[in-house]
Image: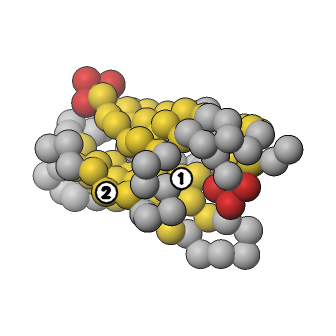
Amino acid sequence: QVQLVESGGGLVQPGGSLRLSCAASGRIFSINYMGWYRRAPGKQRELVASITSGGSTNYVDAVRGRFTISRDNAKNTVYLQMNSLKSEDTAVYYCKIISGGTYTAYWGQGTQVTVSS
């Protein structure tokens, strides 16, 4: 069984920064894909950023240049550094991983990010 534990969400003023973390534990030996998604009120969940095992990254246009995704393979952890936050970044953020070998997808429980003055 694999568990994902997210942390780092909260309330921040526009222009501020937050760093999200997502740590995977349990019966997982390698991680192929790691990504961050978000669901804003009244909208569908969307991909924010992703990173492959080789380090290739991808960002949605709305966050490119403001957000940075990174991973620590030794800790099975993925991070999302969010700078210059805007009110439209307010959402529940979820991490997703895809394991190597079986290519099974796992989701975190979600962490709330609220950008407001």
Please tell me which residue is depicted at 58% across the width and 52% down the height of the picture: 93
Q: Are marks 1 and 2 in contact (CB under 8 Å)?
A: no
Q: Earlier in the sequence, mark 1 or mark 2?
A: 2
Find disc 1 in the rendering and name its residue: 94
| Residue 24 visible to the viewer | no
Residue 27 position by quadrant: top left
Instruction: Give the camera-side residue of 86 and 93.
Output: 86
**Residue sticking out furthest to the right:** 117
Q: Quadrant of the C terminus?
A: top right
Label 1, label 2: how far apart the Cα atoms are:
16 Å
Q: Secondary structure at mark 2?
A: strand
Please tell me which residue is depicted at 42% across the width and 63% down the height of the picture: 60
Above or below: residue 54 compared with residue 106: above
Residue type at mark 1? Tyr
Instruction: Give the camera-side residue of 109 and 90.
Output: 90
Residue 79 in the figure: left or right of residue 32: right
Please tell me which residue is depicted at 41% across the width and 41% down the height of the picture: 68
Residue 90 position by quadrant: bottom right
Dot 1 crowding, Cα within 10 Å, few <14, some 14–19, many 20+: many
Dot 2 crowding, Cα within 10 Å, few <14, some 14–19, many 20+: some
| Residue 1 visible to the viewer | yes
Residue 62 in the figure: left or right of residue 10: left
Task: Return the x and y of residue 64 as percentages of the image width and height.
Answer: 43, 54
Residue type at mark 2? Asn
Task: Return the x and y of residue 19 as percentages of the image width and height.
Answer: 55, 33
Looking at the image, is mark 1 or mark 2 nearer the viewer? 2
**Residue sticking out furthest to the top:** 74
Q: How is the image coloured?
A: secondary structure
Task: Return the x and y of residue 39 as percentages of the image width and height.
Answer: 62, 64
Residue 114 in the figure: left or right of residue 49: right
Above or below: residue 88 compared with residue 110: below
Find disc 2 in the rendering and name its residue: 58
